[in-house]
Amino acid sequence: MFYSVRHITRFRYSNPVRESVMELRMQPRSEWHQALRNFQIATTPRTQLYAYTDHFGNAVYHFNVLREHAELRLEAQSVIEVNLPPPLPPTADPLEWQRYNPFNLTAEHCDLIGPSAFARASPELAQFAAAHGIEKPEGDTLSALKRLNSAIYGAFDYELGVTQVHSPIEQALAAKRGVCQDFAHIMIAIARSWGMPARYVSGYLYHRRQDRDRSGDDATHAWMEAFLPSFGWVGFDPTNNILAGERHIRVAVGRDYADVPPTRGTFKGDAESELGVAVTVEPASAPVRHEEFLRVARPMSASMERAQSAERLHQQQQQQQQQQ
């Protein structure tokens, strides 16, 4: 399945600012069952973009706008091919828990077991887990994660404005409401308390009417991935009580949201800022490769080739006579 993603971010300032410094994580990853086919970023005002890859493998763009401006607009457009991930069995091997050992875990996995800024243990989280019977995993690893996914989905209402991007999980736990970012952090924190490496995924979700997703179709999306030694990284979407699949478009991964915000920056000037975001995810046709323009639709006939060869020979003879 091919998707076209358009992600627009606009910063408006109450007074013109002198400089903006910005870092972006908007380029979808190209790995596993997902392949990035096209990507471009445009900024207004125009400026030079620089790029690097962070230690999680995310593409990061950064730039400076060094002239006065009252608005900064960023537009990222992508074409991504996403295929269905390999099917999982209904349950995992009961011995899977024993495979969380030094033979199967690397330094990267160990960095994703401990607490992080937004996904950490707390008394409120412990009370929530105990109240829903998920303080300890039951059954095999895959069944335990599915049960956790469902428990979070059933315990919270999806509502914008209750929390902000930098809100701790305790705020959503107290309100029993929140958004995809909150639910992903809560699931990550509980999975880590079980001894599982877990990470935060930022990206997009293609919405279809028949799926009745709770998350909005005009915004970015977030979910989590847990590492299962026999299967690798497996994505779970507690916002919608589903496993990550063909409709999920991965952009960046990290310990939590603090590692992967779509935009992060600052400006110089005495002004207040207003942020506006618009996201569109639509099915797309397969992009045409450059070599497809060079395919010969109608080969030359043999007589035409002979005529051209004769013409070239005649031109060479004339050149030799002129040189003599």
Image (cartoon, grey):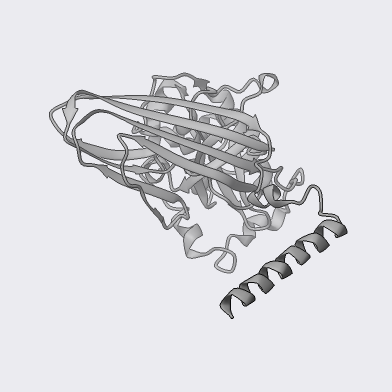
For residue 194, side relative to residue 165 (left or right): right
**Residue at far right of view:** 302
Which residue: 62% across, 25% down?
207
In the image, residue 318 above or below residue 44: below
> Can you say which quadrant of the picture contains the N terminus?
top right
Query: Where does the C terminus fall, quadrant-wise?
Result: bottom right
Task: Give the image quarter of residue 274.
Answer: top left
Which residue corresponds to the image point at 54% horizontal and 48% vertical from the top-left? 29
**Residue at screen point 74% across, 51% down:** 295
Residue 148 seen anywhere in this rendered image of the structure: no
Residue 44 sits in which quadrant? top left
Locate residue 153, reporting x and y percent.
Answer: 57, 27
Q: Is residue 51 left or right of residue 194?
A: left
Of residue 290 and residue 213, the one placed in the foreground of this image is: 290
Residue 188 placed where, x, y %? 50, 42
In this figure, what is the number of numbered marks?
0
Left or right: 213 in relation to 270:
right
Point out residue 89 in the picture as x, y percentages from the top left corner.
77, 46
Q: Which quadrant holds residue 149? A: top right
Q: Position of residue 22 (x, y in %)?
A: 30, 41
Asked if residue 319 can be seen in this view, the reply is yes
Q: In the rendered image of this protein, does residue 137 appear above or below residue 174?
A: below
Nearer to me, 114 or 277? 277
Q: Residue at x 64, y 52 (%)?
A: 32
Single out the residue that lies furthest toward the left. 270
The residue at the far bottom in this view is: 324
